[in-house]
Amino acid sequence: MYKILHIVPHMGGGVGRVLRNFIGSSHEQEDFFHQLICLDYANNDTKEWSKKFGIELFENGITDYQLLESKIKETDIVHIHFWNHPLLYRFLSIDSFPQFRAVIWSHVNGHHPPNIFTDQVLLYPDFFVISTEYSLSSDAIKRQTVEWREKNLKLVFETAGYEHVEGVHHLDHSFFNIGYIGTVSYSKMHRDFLEICYSIQIPDKKFIVCGGDDHNHLQKEADDKGYLNIFDFTGPLKNIKPILSKLDVFGYPLCKENYGTGEQVLIEAMACGVVPVVLDNGPERFIVEQYKSGIVASTIEEYQKAIEFLYYNPNIRQKMAEYAIDQVIHKMSIKKTRNRWHKIYRELLKIPQKNHVLKDSNNNPINHPNMGCKLFLLSLGETKISHLYSNLLSLPNNRDIHTLGITESMSPIFCSPSKGSVFHYFSFFPDDMQLKTLCDLTNSICKGKNNL
């Protein structure tokens, strides 16, 4: 039996469920022995799961170098789970680990900062595994050689399966219910989400919005606009099956810069026969089969018309629902994910162990002082916002000009306290004065945006 050591920033909701279901399924095959180190925390669901399956679980791993070193030394493969997180970049920059085999599985699509791919991250592991075909068109992957793409790049679609929502039966209800489940924040949702919903021209409409973290903010905004009567904001829910049982359509208009890949809630809705309507963003168009399992809209107007069409054509909606169920069952099972990963593991075992370390763009180690700021800027690669942030530090006399540039190019995710923002990095590197400077400037920009 071969040992697989998973390194993950934290184990929470979406990605956490994917990993729990995959590792649990793999564990049943008895070919691979899995251990899990969270660089930060693991939620209660993960702790209960680890006890049930006998999976060794460690929290706050970034603070225990001896644990990391000993587990890396005794494992056959280090399986690293990637998205922009300060502790993950800190882990990747450690240059004193023993030699090991490394594979990175990306849980973001890599197109938009702060969740982009950089050359340094792509070239760190022996294999880099993307979780959506959309990632193939990201700038960093297109920059790599044909040889690297053929030898070192793999694809495993990200799914937690559908078994946990099996048995959902549609219940009678009074309204035409359009559901949104997932991250309730403009860092992922379309910025005009409330107006988009309000302007859909059908009677008896109700929008059920499930999830966090900004649900209270959106609820207040809906109330201020006079829209609240058509919305039901539930906040985060542990069990979404009762919600899925009373939905007619799954309305999922995300912002163009969203970082998603497998979009697990989209798969769950389809598995329950809830027809999705999405915007023509990269990840969604690789999941929804146009006019078969749902509708992919090119514009906001098309999105609204699609929901109106499904309202007035229940027979067509039913046919799409049946196709969506069949698509999920045959293409998105956790068994397919498990088998693909086992194949990658066996291929990786043939490769000798070697040193892996993330260095800066000049191939230098990333050390103190201001390590947090160095890692933050490195994570943004050669993007416009990275250069603007760098200029804010190096050209203090021209800060008004560069602040204006950031204001114009900054997406809402950079105002988040987490999700790879400068505030996220400062929360883990509170003594980094360069990060503090960038936080103060970003905070003023975010306040200005909120007042627009």
Image (spheres, rainbow, N blue to C red):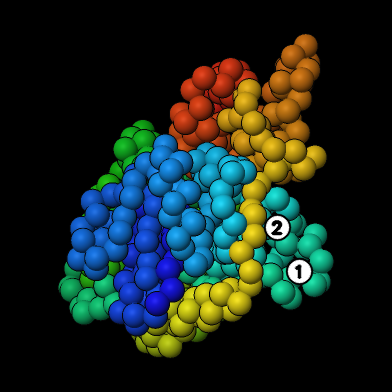
Q: Circle 2 sits on which residue?
A: 123
Judge left or right: residue 159 versus residue 393: left
Discs 1, 2 touching: Cβ within 8 Å? yes
Q: Is residue 229 above or below residue 376?
A: below
Give the distance between the C-alpha atoms of the residues marked 1 and 2, in whole angstroms. Answer: 9 Å
Task: Give the camera-side residue of 281 and 419.
Answer: 419
Task: Give the camera-side residue of 106 and 31.
Answer: 31
Q: Which amino acid type is shown beneath numbered disc 1?
A: Trp
State the image quarter where residue 167 is shown.
bottom left
Question: Residue 130's spot in the image, x, y percent?
Answer: 59, 66
Q: Give the position of the C terminus as an image quadrant.
A: top right
Question: Residue 384's spot in the image, x, y percent?
Answer: 75, 39
Question: Residue 441's spot in the image, x, y percent?
Answer: 60, 20
Q: Residue at x 54, y 36 (%)?
A: 421
Q: Residue at x 58, y 24 (%)?
A: 435
Task: Give the camera-side residue of 396 and 236.
Answer: 396
Judge left or right: residue 189 versus residue 153: left
- State the count of labels: 2
Q: Is residue 159 above or below residue 313?
A: above
Instruction: Work out whether residue 262 can be spotted.
Output: no
State the image quarter where residue 35 is shown.
bottom left
State the image quarter where residue 138 is shown.
bottom right
Q: Circle 1 sits on which residue?
A: 148
Q: For the residue carrying disc 1, how many other residues have a C-alpha within 10 Å: few (<14), some (14-19), or many (20+)?
A: some
Q: Residue at x 61, y 64 (%)?
A: 353
Q: For the residue carrying disc 2, how many other residues have a C-alpha within 10 Å: few (<14), some (14-19), or many (20+)?
A: some
Question: Residue 127's spot in the image, x, y percent?
Answer: 63, 67
